[in-house]
Amino acid sequence: MSNEEISDDDELQNTGASAIITEIEQLNLNEEEEKDKCDCSTRSSDVSCENIFNHMDYFFGENEKCTVHPCFARWLTKKAKNLDELQTIDRYALLQRIKRNFNYREMCLDDEEFQEWTVEWKSTAKYERMPLIQSFLRMLLSEGGSTFYYSFCRNDIIEEDCGWHCIECRRCKDWREWHCKKCNKCTYGASSPCQRCGHKG
């Protein structure tokens, strides 16, 4: 995608699940500009590839075609610059971080998919839980994995309809906020003009 196409797309309102350019696409664009760019595709199975986003099976399980949620993508780029660093991330500790969240119990009570996961978790021996850990991470750290996602920005579990991750501001936002392309900041009021510059998006 050319920079011209991106700027044309940027004129459209970027809210919630309808974000035009995902964080992962933006990260791939940035990687292409670096002199040591990866020549393989984003779905590569080449184990020698150093692009960490080609090794998401570490988190999501083998043969799972998932798109990384933009908030998780942002967190990952801070934590891991290469494959070796990626594989030092403790998946069980990541699961525990999410489960300690205040909204976790509420989510489990409200969502049938998480209720089923909890029953299976309790009945599975500890040494056999890795597929369940990956299933859990897939549900909350990939796009469309469930109706919820885990926000590293807010350290909170958020319903997809109630929040989104702004790739320009690099923060999770309320569903009523939108990113103004004129002043390049998020503003409140889904149908209102920008509070800073008056642009109507």
Image (cartoon, rainbow, N blue to C red):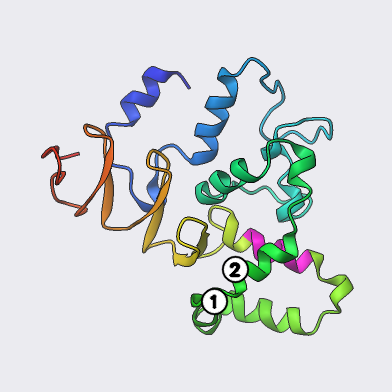
Query: What's the residue at 26%, 57% (across, down)?
Result: 176
Determine whether label 1 and label 2 are within 8 Å by CB.
yes
Q: Mark 2 belongs to which amino acid? A: Ile
Who is closer to the viewer here, 75 or 45?
Answer: 75
Q: Amino acid at mark 1?
A: Tyr
* Residue 80 point in image, percent of width and height: 68, 42
Residue position for label 2? 98
Residue placed under numbered mark 1 in the picture: 104
Between the residue at mark 1 and the residue at mark 2, the CA separation in whole angstroms equals: 7 Å
Q: Residue furthest left?
A: 198
Query: Which residue is found at the position 37% from the left and 53% from the top?
Result: 16
**Camera-side residue of 84 and 30:** 84
Residue at position x 48%, y 40% in the image: 22
Residue at the extreme right: 127
Q: Position of residue 20 (x, y in %)?
A: 40, 39
Q: Range of the magenta residues?
A: 131-138
Looking at the image, residue 199 lies above or below residue 143: above
Q: Residues within 10 Å of mark 1 (few under 14, many from 20)?
A: some
Q: Considering the numbered disc 1 on the image, is that residue within a helix, a strand or a loop?
A: helix
Q: Is residue 143 magenta?
A: no
Q: Position of residue 181 (x, y in %)?
A: 26, 34
